[in-house]
Image: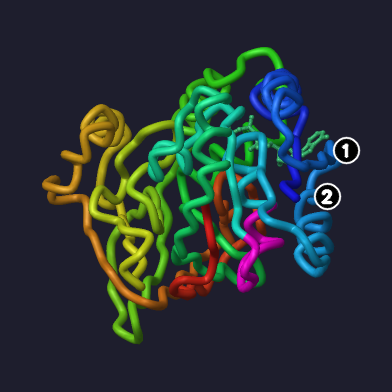
Amino acid sequence: MYTFLVNPAAGNGRGQQVWNRVRKKLEKTSIPYQAEITSYAGEATEIARKLAEQPGIRAIVAIGGDGTVHEVGNGLVKTEIPLGYIPAGSGNDFASAHGIPSHPERALERILRHQVRRIDTAQVNNRMMIGFSGIGFDGKVAESVNSSSSKRWLGRFAYLAGAFQTWARFRPYQMTLVVDGQPFHYQGIWLIAVANIPNYGGGMLICPHADSGDGLLDLCCVHSLTKARFLQIIPSVFRGAHIHHPSVSLHRGETFTITSDPPLPIHADGEIIGKTPATIRIHPQSLSIL
Ligand SMILES: Nc1ncnc2c1ncn2[C@@H]1O[C@H](COP(=O)(O)OP(=O)(O)OP(=O)(O)O)[C@@H](O)[C@H]1O
């Protein structure tokens, strides 16, 4: 039995529309399925966790954005039940990284081919990140966008508006970074992004060499930049060319520890999950995906 977990609020209402299309296509087949529509944040994790213990579940398919992948993935990590995904959010970075079609019917066809792969995830304090996480500028943007109603009327442009507002007020921070036991010191940190997939924020190649099957996490630290220079660097992130800039430092490892004063918001897959200090540890091959 395929179970669909639908976030109707994702992508400014697109979650429900995408599910309507997928359901129509399923009704033309004899494939057994069931669906649950989430009614509050966090419910998808609870449902996925419960379903994973039931017999006869072939896959759990998330319909929503990266936040929905985060929630369903948190319920399935360390189980054998595969996560399917039909994108209906604003960023859909998990889909682009894994070659999942943005077209709902094609994404469904891929799920039904049922080719299972194991991927790495990472523990960020007491949650799992499925694709990426961040502290600093991007954490503040996620915090401001998720706590306002701007997504409802601006859709994907809410991130752009949130980024601009955050940039106008932002002051770089002092943070301490430890990579597999080795400390690194950078001045004036704008952001530290940790990734299992190359892209986040709707296609920015923040860690262009990240690989969700290599048993390692990639980290990108942006530091020592004036406000104007930070803005100048952003276009190059879409090509992954920022990594050649002297104010961008990359690391790869199994465990990162990040501390800051004051404590800063941490996002995992775009969802705010707490504040620093953060310990981020790879869990190799811990999630099955379709
Ligand atoms: N029924 C619901 N009503 C309101 N919010 C919900 C509901 N179900 C889930 N959520 C929450 O909606 C939030 C946004 O989900 P998601 O990230 O999937 O979509 P998005 O924000 O539109 O996409 P993206 O992350 O790609 O920008 C998540 O925090 C999730 O917990």
Which percent across, then down, holds residue 82?
Answer: 60, 58
Label 1 secondary element: loop
- Residue 75 sits inside the magenta stretch: yes
Is residue 124 shown to the viewer in this render?
Answer: yes
Q: Which residue is mark 1?
A: 39
Q: Amino acid at mark 1?
A: Ser
Q: Residue at x 52, y 65 (%)?
A: 261
As displayed, is residue 173 above or below residue 251?
above
Magenta region, residue range: 72-81
> Which amino acid type is marked by label 2?
Glu
Image quadrant of ligand 1 equals top right
Q: Quadrant of residue 180?
A: bottom left
Residue at 39 percent of width and 51 percent of height: 191
Q: Is residue 229 left or right of residue 260?
A: left
Q: Does the magenta-highlighted stretch encompass residue 192?
A: no
Q: Is mark 1 within 8 Å of ligand 1?
A: yes
**Badge 2 local density, few (<14 within 10 Å), some, or many (20+)?**
some
Q: Secondary structure at mark 2?
A: helix
Instruction: Please say if 84 is above or below 155.
Output: below
The residue tagged 2 is 43
Q: How many marks?
A: 2
Label 2 CB sits under 8 Å from any ligand 1 atom? yes
Image coordinates of residue 22 in percent, x first then y, are: 68, 25
User: Residue sitting at 46 percent across and 70 percent down?
Assistant: 258
- Judging depth in this view, the residue of 271 and 160 nearest the camera is 271
Q: Are marks 1 and 2 in contact (CB under 8 Å)?
A: yes
Residue nearer the viewer, 115 or 78: 115
The structure residue drawn at horizontal position 57% and vertical position 22%, both measured from the top left corner, is 158
Q: Residue furthest front?
A: 30
